[in-house]
Image: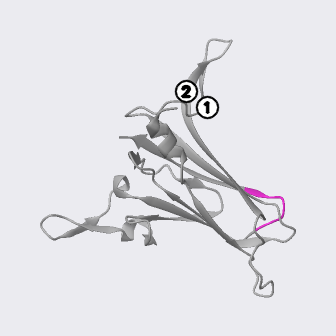
Amino acid sequence: MNAITQALLIGLLSISPALASPDKAAPAKPGDIVVTSLAEQEVEVKLPDGKTEKKRQPVLTAIPGAEVIYTTRFTNRGKRPAGNVVVTNPVPEHTVFVGGSAFGENTSMTYSLDGINFNTPDKLKVKTPDGKERTALPSEYTAIRWAYRGELAPGKTGEVGFRVRIK
């Protein structure tokens, strides 16, 4: 595994779970939400019938121009539903977010230009050299945040992810 690949796999996410209902005042216990992260690439595989299909495989080498798919799975291993589950992934150093590639069923997505402040794409603004404002480009995003809607039932799993291109 090369240095860029190692950097891509380190420090990929933070997750913030809490129990959903006000009458369940305590936060989720440590370990209730179990998180796994994957870094994969799509490859074309030739099938026995001669057709090809795309399959994902773990990233072994990351070269400039290659696309990497980051997937985060979160499972509620607790005994009570968990709400306010939020997954935040930085766009790894030496990569560029691929616009429109973020996914996550039953989530709302926001993006960041600084890793601290998050908003919808239409509200992310940058100043141009002439002092004017313009809407930020997806390639300028530095982090993505998913907020799971509702409660994640015990034993249930959610999945979020995005694609980047290696610089």
Report the residue that reaches farthest toward the bottom: 23
How many numbered tags mark residues here?
A: 2
Is 123 on the left-hand or right-hand side of 150? left
Q: CA distance from mark 2 to mark 1?
A: 7 Å
Identified by mark 2, the residue type is: Val
Residue identified by numbered label 1 = 57
> Dot 1 lies on which element?
strand
Rendered image quadrant of residue 14 = bottom right
Is 156 on the left-hand or right-hand side of 141? right
SS majority, magenta: loop
Q: Is residue 56 above or below residue 12?
A: above
Residue 55 magenta-drawn? no
- Percent position of residue 63, x then y: 41, 31
Rendered image quadrant of residue 66 = top left
Q: Residues within 10 Å of mark 1 (few under 14, many from 20)?
A: few
Residue 156 magenta-drawn? yes
Rendered image quadrant of residue 20 = bottom right
Report the residue that reaches farthest toward the left: 130
**Residue drawn at (62%, 12%), measured in percent from left and top?**
50
State the extent of the magenta-drawn residues as a range. 152-157
- Percent position of residue 142, x then y: 41, 58
Foreground residue among 161 and 50: 161
Residue identified by numbered label 2 = 43
Residue 37 is marked as none
Foreground residue among 41 and 35: 35
Foreground residue among 148 and 8: 8
